[in-house]
C-alpha cells in the first residue's frame, strides 16, 4: 500500500475516535437526543473495509454507524448536524444517530432494527447483478443480528443467487448486555454462516492492517467471482451499548484488557516503527482532526432546526 | 396505599402472579441478567431463577413462537418484546398462530399468553423506534389488547391478563415507566373490557388511553377554567372495547373527542368513532373529532417530533370544535394535501405531452 493510503487509514480512525468522543460529550450536554451508540473501539473495522472499496460500491450499516459514515467520507459537520437534529444534517434531521444516509456517497443507512439491513444488502446485490456491473456491497451488522431470521434468509439467498455482498459481522462480544456465547449455539459467528456454503473468515478487528488485508481479498474475489462472503471481525466497544447502559454485565478488567489492544495507538506505533510516518506528522494529523471535529460541532450548533412544515415532507416520493 | 412507579407496579404484578402460579414464566430479550431494558423485570431473576426468567437471543419471531407453543401445552408465558417496534418481526407467530389456534382447533386449544411491550414516542428515537401499533393488534380476532395508563391500572390489568386464557397484547408506554401513582397494598385485579371514567364531566367526553390520558386530563383541567366540564374516559381495554360506558357518557354529554397517539388512518380512534355512530348517533350534537399523531413516520429532530405528537393545545382545540366554538377545524391531512398536489402536477405534465404530440 502507498504511504498516503496507510496514513489516511490512521487519519480516518482518529477522526472517528475524536468525533465519537465529542458526540458523547454533546449528548451529555443535551445537544443530542434519543439513542446514541458510539463506535469507539471498533474503528479499525469500518476503516479497514471501507478504505478497500470504490466510490461506486455500496455500504450499509446498522445503528452503530457514525464510524462507517465518516469512513465513507461523509462530511463530519453534516453527520454531527444530524445528531443535533438540524436541517443541514445528512438526513435533514429526520433520521438521527441511527439513520445516517448519504445516497450520493453510496452510504445506504443507518438501520435501527437488528438484522434489518441484511436483506436490503442482498437486494442491492441483486440489483448489481441485474444491471451487470461489477460493484460490491459491504453490509455491517452486529453479533446480535446473527440470531434473527433475516440473517439466515439473506445469507441463503445471497449464496444461492451469487449476490456480490460482503457480510461483515462486527462481533464486539455483546448485544446490549448479553454476551454472544450466551445466545449462540455456536460461539463463532462465522460458523453460523458457513452452512450456507459461502467463504467465511474471522479477522482481528482491532488490527486495521489485518482487516484491510481481509477486505482487499474479499473485495477482489467478490468482484471477480460474484459470490458473497462472510467476515467476522472480532472487536470490542469501549463504551456502553448506548449512553444509557449501566454496563454491569462486563468487568472493568475485561475492558482494560481490551484497551491494551486499542487499534489506534497500535497502528500509530506501527507507522512510526516502520518509518512510514514520524511522530510529528501523526501529531499534526491529530491536531488537524481536533479542528475538524470542533468545526463539525460548530457547524451543527449554528445550523437551523428543520422548519415546522418539513414534518410533512418526504413521506412520499 | 403505596406510591410507586408504573414499572414497579408491573414488576409487582409479575412477582405476585409468578408466586401464585408455577406455570407463569417470563421470557424475552435482556429480561433476566440485565434486569430488563426498562427495568420492569428487575429482581425477578434473583427471586425466581433462570428457569422462570429467561433471556433469549434477539429472535423475536422465535420468542413469540416459544411463548405460543409453550402455552399450547399448558404454560402461561409472559413474553416481553423490548419495544412494540420489534414485535413487527414476530407478527407471524402472533397473528397467524397465537390468535388463531383456539378457533382453528375447534376450541381444543387455549393460549394463555401475555405479550407485554412498551410503545410510543417522545424520546427522539426516530421512525423505527417510536411507533404506536395498537390498531394492528386490535384488528385481529382472537387477540385481546390492553393499554394501561396509570400504575394502578398497570398492576391490576397485568394480573388479569396473566390469568386470562387468551393471547393478550399488553401495551405499555416508554414515557410512563417512571410515572408515580397509588397502588393498593392488598390484592386486586381489574377486569379486561371495562373502561374507566377518570374524570366526570357533563359537557363533552374525551375518550383516550395510555400516555394520552394524562395529557387529556390536563387539557380537561384547562378547559374547566373556561367553563367547559369535560368527562375523561380511559379505555383501558382496546379489544374488547367497552362501548356501553362510552355510549352512556355520550348520552349525557352529546359531544366527544378521541385522543390517541397512533396514526389516524385505521387507528384506534377510527374504530371508537365507527362504533359510537352505531350505538350513540341519536345523542350526537356535533361530529366527533379526533386528535392523533400526525400522519407521518416519526422524525428525530426534537421540534418536529414534538409537533407530531398530540398535546394539550390540540386537545383543547378539538374540544372547542366539538362544542361548536371557534376552532381550527380538521382539514385534509397535510400528507394527503401534498399527494394531491403532486398528482395534479403529474397530470399537467401528461397534458403538456399530449399537446406537444398534436
Ligand atoms: C429487531 C430488534 N430487536 C431488538 C432491538 C433492540 N436492540 C437494539 S441494539 C440490540 C443489541 C444488538 O447487538 P449487536 O447486534 O451485537 O450490535 P452492537 O450493539 O453490539 O453493535 C438490541 C437487542 C432492535 N433494535 N431490533
Ligand atoms: Mg454486539
Image (cartoon, helix red, strand yellow):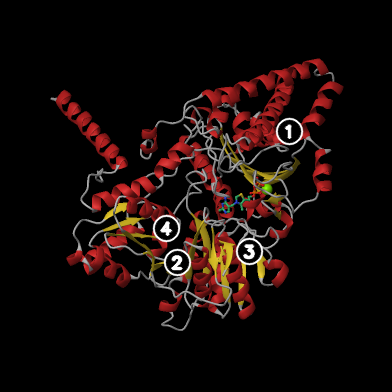
Q: Is residue B15 above or below residue B174?
A: below
**Which of the chains bears the disc numbered 3?**
B
Q: CA distance from mark 3 to mark 4?
A: 25 Å
Helix or strand or loop: what does disc 2 sit on? strand
Percent of width and height locating residue B320: 26, 49
Q: Earlier in the sequence, mark 3 or mark 2?
A: 3
Q: Are marks 4 and 1 in contact (CB under 8 Å)?
A: no
The residue labelled by disc 4 is B213
Give the side of residue B106 with respect to residue A294, left or right: left
The residue labelled by disc 3 is B41
Which quadrant of the figure contains the C terminus of chain A?
top left
Badge 3, how many Cα within 10 Å: few under 14, some, many 20+? many
Q: Are marks 2 and 4 in contact (CB under 8 Å)?
A: no
**Which of the chains bears the disc numbered 1?**
A
Q: Residue B101 shows which numbered tag?
A: none
**Which of the chains bears the disc numbered 4?**
B
**Which of the chains bears the disc numbered 2?**
B
Amino acid at each position: 500500500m502507498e504511504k498516503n493510503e496507510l496514513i489516511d487509514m490512521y487519519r480516518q480512525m482518529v477522526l472517528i475516535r475524536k468525533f465519537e468522543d465529542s458526540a458523547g460529550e454533546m449528548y451529555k450536554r443535551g445537544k443530542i437526543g434519543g439513542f446514541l451508540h458510539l463506535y469507539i473501539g471498533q474503528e479499525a473495522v469500518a476503516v479497514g473495509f471501507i478504505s478497500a472499496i470504490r466510490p461506486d460500491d455500496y455500504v450499509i450499516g446498522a445503528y452503530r454507524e457514525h464510524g462507517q459514515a465518516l469512513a465513507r467520507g461523509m462530511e463530519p459537520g453534516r453527520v454531527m448536524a444530524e445528531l443535533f437534529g438540524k436541517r443541514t444534517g445528512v438526513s435533514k434531521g429526520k433520521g438521527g444517530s441511527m439513520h445516517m444516509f448519504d445516497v450520493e456517497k453510496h452510504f445506504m443507512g443507518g438501520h435501527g432494527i437488528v438484522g434489518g439491513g441484511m436483506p436490503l444488502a442482498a437486494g442491492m446485490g441483486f440489483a448489481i447483478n441485474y444491471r451487470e456491473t461489477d460493484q460490491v456491497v459491504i453490509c455491517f451488522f452486529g453479533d446480535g443480528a446473527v440470531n434473527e431470521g433475516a440473517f439466515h434468509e439473506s445469507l441463503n439467498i445471497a449464496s444461492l443467487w451469487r449476490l456480490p455482498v460482503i457480510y461483515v459481522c462486527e462481533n464486539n462480544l455483546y448485544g446490549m448486555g448479553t454476551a454472544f456465547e450466551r445466545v449462540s449455539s455456536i460461539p463463532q459467528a462465522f460458523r453460523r454462516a458457513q452452512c450456507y456454503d459461502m467463504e467465511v473468515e474471522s479477522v482481528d478487528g482491532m488490527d486495521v492492517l489485518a482487516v484491510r488485508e481481509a477486505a482487499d481479498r474479499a473485495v477482489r474475489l467478490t468482484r471477480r467471482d460474484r459470490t458473497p462472503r462472510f467476515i467476522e471481525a472480532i472487536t470490542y466497544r469501549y463504551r456502553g451499548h448506548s449512553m444509557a447502559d449501566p454496563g454491569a454485565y462486563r468487568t472493568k478488567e475485561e475492558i482494560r484488557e481490551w484497551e491494551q489492544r486499542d487499534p489506534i495507538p497500535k497502528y500509530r506505533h506501527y507507522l512510526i516503527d516502520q518509518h512510514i510516518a514520524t511522530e510529528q506528522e501523526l501529531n499534526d494529523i491529530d491536531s488537524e482532526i481536533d479542528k475538524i471535529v470542533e468545526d463539525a460541532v460548530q457547524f451543527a450548533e449554528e445550523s437551523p432546526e428543520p422548519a415546522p412544515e418539513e414534518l410533512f415532507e418526504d413521506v412520499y416520493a | 396505599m403505596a406510591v410507586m412507579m408504573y414499572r414497579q407496579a408491573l414488576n409487582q404484578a409479575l412477582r405476585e402472579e409468578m408466586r401464585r402460579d408455577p406455570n407463569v414464566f417470563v421470557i424475552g430479550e435482556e429480561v433476566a441478567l440485565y434486569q430488563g431494558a426498562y427495568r420492569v423485570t428487575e429482581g425477578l431473576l434473583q427471586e425466581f431463577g433462570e428457569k422462570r426468567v429467561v433471556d433469549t437471543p434477539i429472535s423475536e419471531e422465535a420468542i413469540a413462537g416459544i411463548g405460543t407453543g409453550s402455552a399450547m401445552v399448558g404454560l402461561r408465558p409472559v413474553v416481553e418484546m423490548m419495544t412494540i417496534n420489534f414485535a413487527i418481526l414476530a407478527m407471524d407467530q402472533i397473528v397467524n398462530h397465537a390468535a388463531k389456534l383456539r378457533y382453528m382447533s375447534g376450541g381444543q386449544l387455549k393460549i394463555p399468553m401475555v405479550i407485554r411491550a412498551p410503545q410510543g414516542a417522545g424520546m427522539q428515537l426516530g421512525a423505527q423506534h417510536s411507533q404506536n401499533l395498537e390498531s394492528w393488534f386490535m384488528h385481529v380476532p382472537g387477540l385481546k389488547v390492553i393499554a394501561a395508563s396509570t400504575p394502578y391500572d398497570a398492576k391490576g390489568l397485568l394480573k388479569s391478563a396473566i390469568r386470562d386464557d387468551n393471547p393478550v397484547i399488553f401495551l405499555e408506554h416508554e414515557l410512563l415507566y417512571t410515572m408515580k401513582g397509588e397502588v393498593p397494598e392488598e390484592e386486586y385485579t381489574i377486569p379486561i373490557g371495562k373502561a374507566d371514567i377518570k374524570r366526570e364531566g357533563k359537557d363533552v367526553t374525551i375518550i383516550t388511553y395510555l400516555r394520552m390520558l394524562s395529557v387529556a386530563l390536563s387539557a380537561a383541567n384547562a378547559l374547566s377554567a373556561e367553563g367547559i366540564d369535560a368527562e375523561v374516559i380511559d379505555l383501558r381495554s382496546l379489544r374488547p372495547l367497552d362501548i356501553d360506558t362510552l355510549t352512556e357518557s355520550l348520552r349525557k354529554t352529546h359531544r366527544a373527542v378521541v385522543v390517541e397517539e397512533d396514526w389516524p388512518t385505521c387507528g384506534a380512534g377510527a374504530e371508537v368513532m365507527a362504533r359510537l355512530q352505531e350505538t350513540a348517533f341519536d345523542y350526537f350534537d356535533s361530529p366527533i373529532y379526533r386528535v392523533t399523531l400526525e400522519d407521518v413516520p416519526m422524525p428525530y429532530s426534537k421540534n418536529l417530533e414534538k409537533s407530531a405528537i398530540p398535546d394539550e393545545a390540540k386537545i383543547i382545540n378539538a374540544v372547542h370544535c366539538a362544542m361548536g366554538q371557534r376552532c381550527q377545524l380538521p382539514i385534509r391531512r397535510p400528507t394527503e394535501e401534498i399527494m394531491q398536489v403532486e398528482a395534479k402536477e403529474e397530470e399537467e405534465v401528461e397534458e403538456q405531452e399530449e399537446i406537444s404530440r398534436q
